């Protein structure tokens, strides 16, 4: 069983340890330097809405996400989805993202939630599709090594999810 709560300063060092490689960090937080530092994550959270952690039954932090790019009456974006390697495939990400969907729909009252998933992240794309997000566009992104990759833009129409 998982629960979500607002992120605190003490959570950032824990979450910063989750990305296992430079590529994995790029999927989660493209502008961050690897290895991720708690200070980077905390500074980023100050500019985001609803920095949120998901915790397990024992209270251990299992994941983190936030919302950015809020445009009143239009949309917002899901950002920095980072899940502990120990909790991947166990429902933590689903619970976290469903919580963020509810925040966008019920608190921000936007009709649409968008996100970007990078094309090498097949597992992420399949997961977002399973949750009901649908691709609607592409954007060219350059990773930290200078390689051009494709960011697939996904959206969910929130009025369809009651």
Image (tube, rainbow, N blue to C red):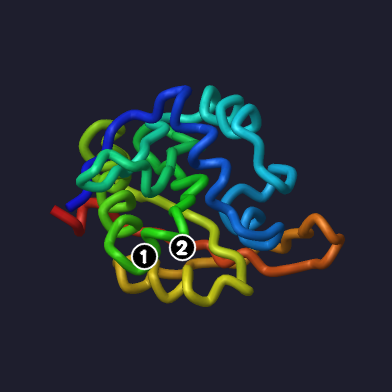
Label 2 secondary element: strand
Residue on which the image places disc 1: 133
Graded by Cα atoms within 10 Å as few (under 14), some (14 to 19) or many (20 or more), the crowding at tag 1 reads many
Name the spot of residue 74 as percent of width and height, x first: 39, 41
Q: Residue at 47% x, 23% y: name it.
A: 9
64 over 118 or under it: above or below: above
- Seen in the picture, residue 50 relative to 114 is either above or below; the reply is above
Which percent across, then down, holds residue 2?
Answer: 22, 49
Residue at 70 percent across and 46 percent down: it is 35
> Residue 113 at what x, y percent from top left?
38, 50
Mark 2–mark 1 CB contact (< 8 Å): yes
Q: Is residue 68 left or right of residue 88?
A: right
Q: Which mark is residue 154?
A: 2
Residue 121: x and y, percent?
Answer: 57, 71
Q: Is residue 28 left or right of residue 133?
A: right
Residue at the extreme right: 146
Q: Quadrant of residue 139?
A: bottom right
């Amino acid at each position: 069983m998982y629960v979500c709560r607002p992120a605190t300063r003490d959570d950032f060092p824990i979450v910063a340890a989750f990305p296992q490689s430079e590529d994995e960090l790029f999927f989660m937080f493209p502008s961050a330097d690897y290895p991720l530092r708690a200070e980077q994550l905390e500074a980023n959270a100050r500019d985001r809405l609803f920095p949120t952690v998901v915790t397990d039954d024992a209270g251990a932090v299992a994941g983190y996400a936030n919302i950015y790019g809020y445009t009143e009456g239009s949309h917002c974006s899901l950002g920095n989805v980072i899940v502990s390697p120990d909790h991947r495939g166990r429902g933590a990400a689903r619970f976290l993202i469903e919580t963020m969907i509810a925040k966008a729909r019920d608190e921000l009252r936007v009709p649409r939630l968008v996100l970007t998933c990078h094309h090498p992240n097949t597992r992420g794309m399949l997961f977002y599709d399973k949750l009901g997000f649908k691709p609607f566009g592409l954007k060219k992104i350059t990773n930290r090594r200078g390689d051009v990759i494709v960011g697939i833009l996904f959206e969910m129409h929130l009025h369809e999810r009651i």
